Structure formats: structure tokens, C-alpha cells
Amino acid sequence: MLQSFNSTNSSMELSSSLTPFSKKLSDISFSSSLSPFPLQLYPQTSKPKNLRVLAVAVGPSQELPRNSPQRLLKELAHRKKATAPRKKVPPKRFILKPPLDDKKLTERFLNSPQLSLKQFPLLSSCLPSSKLNTADNTWIDEYLLEAKQALGYPLEKSDELGDDNPAKQFDTLLYLAFQHPSCDRTNARHVRSAHSRLWFLGQYVLELALAEFFLQRYPRESPGPMRERVFGLIGKRNLPNWIKAASLQNLIFPYDDMDKLIRKDREPPVKSVFWALFGAIYLCFGMPEVYHVLFEVFGMEPEAEDCQPRLRRQLEDVDYVSVEFEGNKLSWQDVATYKPPQDALFAHPRLFRACVPPGMHRFRGNIWDYDSKPQVMQILGYPLAVNDRIPEITEARNIELGLGLQLCFMHPSKYKFEHPRFCFERLEYVGQKIQSLGSGYGGEVADEASRRPWKMATREASPCSYEQVLREVFAGKVYASFYHLLGASSRCV
């Protein structure tokens, strides 16, 4: 009994001695190396139930450590807030508007400049759909004289010319040519639409002009080197140099230095304005003025080193070229001022002779000439009923016509190393440019040419060359070139 009493007494003494120690322990705080916040240890008897830490307040002067999770969370929340996507607003053109009543719609159509020209349908289609407003006239009053002076045109207003002169619209088209997609006025629909139509037309006008020029200047050269020459002259990398040579860079970039701009900001506006300029010049003054501006105003040189084609192996040409090409490199003045003789066989006799040399007559009289040529002539509607002053001229024209059509079917899959391949490629080259120019603006020359001879050509082509014929002959390129050389585009349209 005494033993049990002693054990009870010793346990009570031990508990009384531990109680102060636990109280002191609860007053001690431990700080972690990862967190600056004090960690409190509560005794078991006074520990609150369901303790939740909702937020931790930190003084403004106290800065979080670099590796603190709270700091990382704070920076992440700040970034999400800064980069949060904004609500997208639909563009104005997609917002539905109430339709115009019949009276206002009729007035808009009747007052459109596109209806003011009935004699020149292509020119009227490139005019703005509505009249120029005050902002447009402000640009014309401020910059148009500078543009006309740089291009070498008279400073008088073109509105004073007669209605039968297409140059009357030159001021309007020249203004629209400089309104590239990166400028301020491109937000106006009538300006944006007219400029896009001008540069679309001018692109193919330039390619056709240079194709005709190089075909006559280099009668023994294949189209491959010619394409390299064209690219060297009017490639997008070289266009800023021509714009700077004509002092037009301040009209395209009025607030920037063109030389300090990067390529993606410099080349697209320059290319758009350059093409649109020649679209306007072609509509108002014709193809001779295109040559004049190219080689006189911009100073292009066909024999420059940077536009020469790479050296390549070429077979010796055994055929004789025409007399006017022999030992004579034609200049741009010869091409621009050329007028066909009165008794010429075709509308473009010299260009035809550059594509079909006189030596090609030795291919006449073969099986194709007797078997297939009558079907081709019948499907295409040739020969035309023409009353020539001399009957021999009509006969000579029909002979040349049959020879040219025969060359259109001598595709390279049959004649790999002979001269018909050379003529076919040259006809295809010029026909490609004519087809692009005609198909873009309502000319159905290429469309008719590529659609009508389908059945006949498939019957005459060999089975091994179907793919080649489908890709080249049916594209209408050689036929389009022939329509252009014959001057029969008006009949096809």
C-alpha cells in the first residue's frame, strides 16, 4: 500500500514539473528558411479546431524572397491580368446595315464615275465606284503635281481634255495608283477597290510589254533567259531602286525613310504602287508610253549586269531569222514606235516573225498538215473572210496561219531537240501573258481558245504525251498568243 502511494506521488510530481515546460514551449516561435512568416506552436489543450488560413498580410516595406512561392504566384497573376485577351469586336464591314431604298441606290449608281465612260469599258471599270471626297481632293492638291513632275507629264489638269480622250481620267488614276494598302486612304472602299484593280492590271501589262520587247530583241533566245531578264528588271527586290531613281519614294512613304525600313515594310507598298502606275499609264496612253516610262523615267537598262541570265548550254540555231532581226538588236524605241505596213499579213507581223522564223516552212506538208489542220481551222473558225487588195496576200496569210497552228501542236514531248520546240516555247511565253491580261478583265480569248479545241487535240495527241498536252496546249497559252498576233481578239470576245 505504501508502494502504491509513492508511485502516485511521483507521477504527480512529474506532471507538475512538465506543465511549466510546455507553457514555455508554446511561447517559442520557429522560423523556416523557406518562409519569413513565424510559425506558432500551440499546446494541445488550447489548439483551435478547424483552423483555416485565408490570407497572409505582408507589409509594403517587406519584400518577398526570390524563391518564395507567394512571389511566384503574384507574378503569375499579374501576367495573366496583363495578357488577358480582349473581347473581339466584329469589323464594321460585317455589321449588318439597313439596305438603301431604291431612290438612293439609283442615285448612287447613276452618279458613279464608272458609268461616265461608255467608250472605254476597261478604263471605266478601274475608276472609283463613287466620286472623290474632300480627303481625296486634299491629297491631289498637295502631292499630285509632284508625282506628275517626277514622271515627266504636264502639270495642267487632265479634266480640261475632251471626253473622247482617255487621258482625261489620268489625274484620278494617278491619285489612286499611290494609295497602297498601307496608307491612310485605303480604308475608303472606293479607293481600295480602284487601287487593287489598277495594280492587278499593271502587273500583266508590264509582263506583256517586256515579253514582246525581249522576244524581238533576242530572236534566238529561249523563254528561260527572258524570264530571268524580266525578273532582274521588275523583281520586287529591285523595284525600290527604280522608285528612288524617279524620286517617288516620298509619295509612297511620306513619314518614313524608305532606306531604313525593313524589307517586309518596304517592298509590298512599292510593288503595289509600281504596278498600279503602269496600269494607269496603259489605260490613258497605251503601250508605247509604258515603254517610255520604263526606260526613260525609271532608267531601266536591258544590258545591265544585274539582269543578265545565267550561262547555259544552248544548241546552235540552224534556222535563219528574219531580215529585220539579223545582226540588229532592237531598242525600246523601235518596239514602241513600230507600225505595221499597210499590206501586213497580221496585226503584229514582226512579233509573229520573231516567234515563227521563215525556216519553219520546211515542216509544212507533213501528215498533220493534211489530216488535222482542216479540223483545227474549222473548229477555230478560220480562215476569216477578208477582202484584201491583192488576192495573193490572203493566200499567204492562210499559209502562215496554218504553219503557226501546226507549231502550236508540236509540243516538246515529241520534238525535244528540234526547232519546233523553240517556236512552241516562244508562242507559249507570249500567250501566257496575253491569257493573263485577257482573263483578268473580261477578255474571253484565252477561255475560248482553251475550251474549243479540246476534242480535236485529244484525238491527235499520242497516248504517251497526254499529260504534257493537258498542261501546256490546253492551258490556252499558244492559242492566246496566236489570237493576239492575228488581231482576232475582238472576234473571240
Image (cartoon, rainbow, N blue to C red):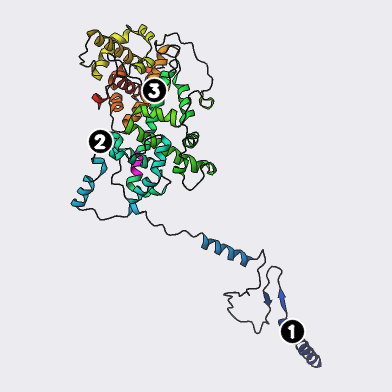
For the residues labelled 2 and 1, say whether their Cβ atoms are less than 8 Å apart: no
What secondary structure is marked by label 1? helix
Disc 3 target residue: 212
**368 vs 23: above or below:** above
The quadrant in which residue 167 appears is top left
Using a 10 Å C-alpha cutoff, classify the residue at mark 3 as few (fewer than 14 neighbours), some (14 to 19) or many (20 or more).
some
Residue appearing at x 38%, y 35% in the figure: 153
Disc 1 target residue: 24
Ranked by sequence position, the earlier of labels 2 and 1 is 1
**174 vs 481: above or below:** below
- Segment colored magenta: 192-197
Front label number (2 vs 1): 2
Q: How far apart are marks 2 and 1 (CA)?
A: 111 Å
For the residues labelled 2 and 3, say whether their Cβ atoms are less than 8 Å apart: no
Ranked by sequence position, the earlier of labels 2 and 3 is 2
Mark carried by residue 242: none
Q: How far apart are marks 1 and 3 (CA)?
A: 105 Å
**Where's the C terminus, which quadrant?**
top left
What secondary structure is marked by label 3? helix
Q: Which amino acid does label 1 sit on?
A: Lys
Disc 2 target residue: 162
Query: Which of the pair 347/335 is nearer the observer?
Result: 335
Query: Which of the pair 324/475 is nearer the observer?
Result: 324
